[in-house]
Structures are given as structure tokens and as C-alpha cells.
Image (spheres, grey):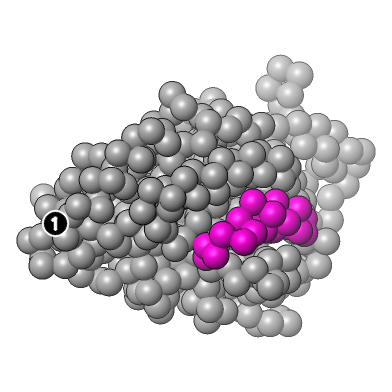
Amino acid sequence: MLSDYFKPEILKKIAAGAGTPVYVYSKAVFLRQISTYKKAFRGLNALFCYSLKANSNRALCALAAGQGLGADVVSGGELYRALRAGFKPGKIIFSGVGKTAEELAYALKSDILFINAESFEEVLELEKTAAKLKKTASFSLRVNPDVAARTHKFITTGRLGGKFGVSFEEAEKIYFYAAGSKHLKAVGAQFHIGSQIYSARPYRLAAARLAGFILKMASRGVNLEYADAGGGWGVKEGFEMPFPGPLARALAAAFKGTGLKLVIEPGRSIAAPTGILLTRVLYRKRGGDKNFIIVDGAMNDLIRPALYGARHPVALLGAARGPIKKYDIVGPVCESGDFLALGAALKEPARGDLAVIYSAGAYGFSMSSNYNSRLRAPEALITGRGAWRLVRKRETLTDLTAKEV
Ligand SMILES: Cc1ncc(COP(=O)(O)O)c(C=O)c1O
């Protein structure tokens, strides 16, 4: 039970010390998800590259680096964070559909493991950048396996017609071009079919297609070292990650005997159960036939309910009274889409009670904004029984205008 890691006593202490809203992470949960992955992939010699987009707080990244994980970054900013947090450059990969020349140069100068390129033009830019720096760029290509994954349309990424990756035909052309360049070294091929996938089936299909393609390329003289299967296993809001054994078995079967080194880039499954958003009840009211709880956290803190229809479990920490009713938990932002939960079955809280929004550790703070000129929330880490520390301070009013000229 996730609530075992986020006990009311410590959450009350954190709320008193850091104020609300505040993101609270559990070191124990974070480390457990990592060890679950290691257990499932035991014997496969896989490189786990923690996907910083899920949660790039330095304290969590440092924990992942300390467990020997690499990093998957998608911007120069994430590369900077990964290096600062202590990830070994030789275990960092750089993905993303639109890297700039400056970002490519930064990656090359940092001697990362490889860059996951997504178009012929990007590879040409990479070659030019590498030539300028007198380097050889190790790259992998993100190929689009055209596999449907049953997930939210905003996080399905492996179908042709989407913006991600290149077709196998295009990849073939790019690898042959790279073979003739002294500034390019093709080292891998990647797919990423989406996020929040709970079934091994689409992975099995995509991995079989990728393995077949890599073997075909090898028969034509292009020998790749890495097969990268993209993001991690799905994880339901309110739960720890289910054991990713089926995912490991699907990938192992597809790449068996190929000699390829497997790379996987989990983000959500490690970070989501690790964090909660702790907010305080400001007001209660009725509107039409609806009961509203207005809290001090909002869509600028956690946009997942509004963006993806995510349903985060909610718990109240006060001495709630009366019968269970359905409540919409909404924030102060001036948007009807500003809600953290709809129709949550709860007893009525009192003003000032704390509300816990579970499974907010991934794509929570990292997608937060200053919309409505709200200050971004602080982040706290529970480090042990009754012990916690602040791992990011609350923004201040002066932060809001600091960059304006
Ligand atoms: C290329 C790539 N790798 C890894 C991830 C992380 O996926 P997840 O958080 O589902 O593990 C994503 C997420 O969209 C991605 O686009």
C-alpha cells in the first residue's frame, strides 16, 4: 500500500515545515521500483536509463545514478541536470524529435553514450556538428515499428503518421549514409511505442520487428551494438509498479542470440508511485448538484488530470465527518479544467485539512508551470522513518519576475 510510505504524522510535519502545496517523495519507494526492475531483468545485462522527463529532481536523479542507472534525457536542460546529478556520461542517451545544433554539440562535448536521432536531417546536423568539433558522433535511430499500444492518444508514439521516429526504409538509408561518414558511428536502434502500457504484447511485436531489422542491417554490413526498447512498464495510479517480468521476457525472447545490449528507459513506473502532492483544503461549497473541495494545489502543479484524464486516488488526513459523498477536488486556477480529481468518494473534510493526491511523482512537478503566476511548489523527500528534507524550495514572488527585462 502506498499509504504505508506516506504516513499522516510525517506528512503533517512536512506541511508544517514546507507549507502546501508540496510534492513529497519517498526514497524507499523510489529505490524499490529500481530494484524491482533489476530483479525482473536479472541475467539480461540491460542498461536502465532513467527517463528524467518523469521527474528530474536532483535528489531522485542522484539516487538513480547511485544505483548504477544511466539517464535518458530529451533536452540540453535535462542533460545538464543528469550530469550535475552524477550520472556517468557513458550511460546517458539523448532522445527527442527536435534537438538543436547547440544541444547536439553539448551532447558530443559531454561524451554521452549515444544520441537517439529521429530524422535524416537531424543526422546530417549531427554529422556537421561532430565535424566542427572533430569528433565522431555515436548515434542510434529511433525507428517507428508501427505498433499500436492501447493507451491515451497523447502518449501513444509508435504508429506511422505520428511525429516520432523514422520508418524502417528511411532508417536503412540513414545507416548506409552513416557508414560512409567519418563523423558518424551508428551504434544502435530504438523504438518507443508509448507510455502507460501494461501488456507485453505490443513490446513483443515491436521488439521482434526491431530485432529482424537489426539482423537485416547486420547482413548488409551495418553492425549495431544496442537495442533500445524505450520507456518503461505501465503503473496504475495508487499502486506500485506491477512486476515487469512479462516485459523482460518479451524483450529477452526477441533479442535472444543477437548479442545486442538491451537498453530500456523507464521513467513513470519508477517515479509515479514515489511521489504525492500534498495540498490543503481552502474551502468547500456546492454548485448545482456538485460538491466541491477547493484546495491550494492546482493544475499548474499537477496537470495530468486535465491533460490525460488521469485519476489519482485522493485521501484526506483530517478527522473527516459525516457520510461519504462525491466531491470534485479543484484548485484556484481560473480554468474549468483545473481539477485534481472528479467525483472522489470522501467524507466531508474541514477547512485546513490536508489532502493527499497519490501517484503524483511522475509528470507532476516536471510538467508544472507558473500559470496564473502561481509559485511552483517545493519538493520534499522522506529519507527514513520520520525523517525528511527539502529537495527544492518553494519559489518566491521575486522568482516570478526575475527574468523579465
Ligand atoms: C523516448 C522516450 N523514452 C522514455 C520515456 C519514458 O516513458 P515512461 O515514463 O512511460 O517510462 C518516454 C516517455 O514518453 C519517451 O518518449
Q: Residue at x 84, y 50 (%)?
A: 320
Q: Is residue 30 left or right of residue 338?
A: right
Q: Say what amino acid the circle numbered 1 marks.
A: Thr
Secondary structure of the residue carrying tag 1 is helix
Where is residue 96 shown, x and y percent of the image?
36, 47
Where is residue 273 shown, x and y percent of the image?
68, 58
Q: Residue at x 50, y 56 (%)?
A: 227
Q: Residue at x 46, y 36 (%)?
A: 144
Where is residue 100 shown, x and y percent of the image?
21, 48
Q: Specify the farthest residue to the left.
A: 132
Q: Which one is nearer the viewer's eye here, 378 or 56?
A: 56
Q: Which one is nearer the viewer's eye here, 239 or 383?
A: 239
Residue behind mark 1: 129
Q: Residue at x 12, y 53 (%)?
A: 128
Q: Which one is nearer the viewer's eye here, 104 or 170?
A: 170
Q: Is residue 137 left or right of residue 208?
A: left
Where is residue 361 shown, x and y percent of the image?
59, 57
Say how many tags the image has.
Answer: 1
Q: Residues within 10 Å of mark 1 (few under 14, many from 20)?
A: many
Q: Is residue 221 above or below residue 169?
A: below
Q: Specify the farthest residue to the right.
A: 323
Report the magenta residues as a range: 242-261
Q: The N terminus is located in which quarter? A: bottom right
Q: Is any part of residue 395 visible from this angle? A: no
